[in-house]
Amino acid sequence: MTALPSTVDMFDLRMSDKAKPLYEAVKQFIADEVEPKTEEYFKLGEGRAERWGYGEGQLELLESIKSKAKEQGLWNFFLPDAETGEGLSNLDYAYIAIELGKNPIASECLNCSAPDTGNMEVLERVGTPEQKEQWLKPLLNGEIRSAYVMTEPDVASSDAKQISCRAERDGDEYVINGEKYYASGAGDPRCKIYIVMLQTDPDGPPHKRQSQILVPADTPGVEILGPMHVFGEDDAPHGHMHIRFDNVRVPASNMLLGEGRGFEISQLRLGPGRIHHCMRSVGAAERALELMVKRGLTREAFGKPLSRLGKNPEVIAKARIEIEACRRMVLTAAKAMDELGNAEARVWVSAVKAMVPIRTCAIVDEAIQIHGATGVSQWTPLARMYASQRTLRLADGPDEVHWFVVGRAETASHEEASRDYDPKVTYYENLENSSADGIFSGP
């Protein structure tokens, strides 16, 4: 038995015939509608009057692209087998998400951007009819944005049992007190709803102490203290905000699924969310390699194009090989979710979450190096891509958590067979029972 559970069909990584036309349509839409307007979109945001807002015409441009995507049916791909989306398998969506990851605004243009994707999946799976009407519907329509609020500044939030932001029941309401940080997307003026991980029962069993609750962004007592910077950038207007909850009152009906079920919801949300990040990371790695090669072919030093200088051919080759390895791991993990379910495929998801951002980060770093000083400047997207991928090694569980999950599963899979493992005893027993010489099996 292996640590990575599998089925015979899991290694058939072909896109379904149903999804192929959609995949081609997405690629064409990105090429025709998104890529030509990406630079204009960011230029419209330069010099805007309100740092935590948008420049004149910026949102209008974005909405025009979104409207075209919606008209063409290129919308909400991320919900597998759901009536509210395209009903794609995780495998089929992986192919599409890799394409989305090549452009910084493509995901939002097709309403497939984080953290909304994970939040919509939670609401679609566990929300009440009233919660879906109030929050899921406008999210699915791309009318509002949302934030997932879990990480805390004063505890190691990778161990979610330590979450200390408190929600206490008071009649028909919950009263929330505590601090959170790195609430991605909470700086956006379009962000209207938070899903917040809270402690509701400090004396309960460790995995039943936490709950998740809906908190409208404009609720009295919600105080945004400011943005957390990532490598010196505040990432406005999206932002990763430091938030204080000071006697924030929300209706008890805002509770998701019920008290003590926070961990259950986290696995529901973070499993798909983690692999979606990895899908987009493969696309980002492709973009970095493309820029690396273009720079190498158009820049000369010491009498040669950079792409043919020193170890650079090897750097380019390794990047291509690692992208293909990452791609196949991500597609296999997606197929595992389809075949085994999210819970059984958890080790696969941890494997790609540990592997892909590290390798993508390294590929972006090599692309920066070939660009020289330009690579860390505003003239290319590489510096922001590096910051994003380096951050991903902490988001949705740090590397160490995912290495631990895979290592624990691998150890457990060999535990039974290892009880009688003793190479010394085995060697001498075989020596006594056989007169044959050892056979060298090397090259």
Image (cartoon, grey):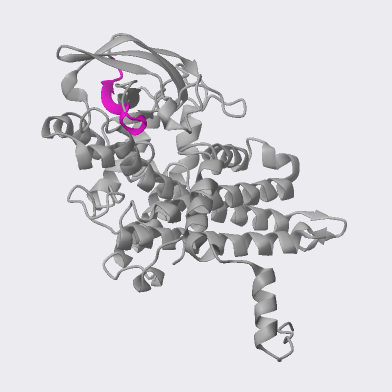
Q: Residue furthest left?
A: 129
Q: Quadrant of the C terminus?
A: bottom right
Please count the marks in the image.
Answer: 0
Q: What is the quadrant of the N terminus in the image? A: bottom left
Q: Residue at x 46, y 58 (%)?
A: 330
Give the camera-side residue of 83 and 371: 83
Q: Residue furthest right?
A: 302
Viewer-proximal residue among 413 and 17: 413
Q: Does residue 308 appear to the left or right of 282 in the view shown? A: right
Q: Is residue 203 left or right of residue 132?
A: right
* Residue 406 relative to residue 59: left or right: right
Whole-percent x and y of residue 391?
Answer: 55, 36
Seen at 46% across and 23% down, the residue is: 152
Reply above or below: 420 against 108. Answer: below
Q: Which residues are magenta?
A: 205-218
Question: Can you say whether 300 is above or below 136 in the image?
Answer: below
- Does the segment drawn in magenta span residue 211? yes
- Residue 303 seen in render: yes
Residue 244's spot in the image, x, y percent? Answer: 41, 13
Residue 114: name its quadrant.
top left
Q: Position of residue 267 (x, y in %)?
A: 34, 42
Nearest to the observer: residue 300 or residue 108 = 108
Instruction: Please tell me which residue is depicted at 45% across the width and 21% down the height of the picture.
Output: 241
Answer yes or no: is residue 27 visible. no
**Residue placed most toward the observer, 421 or 7:** 421
Q: Is residue 244 magenta?
A: no
| Extreme-front residue of the structure | 432
Give the x, y percent position of residue 337. Answer: 34, 57
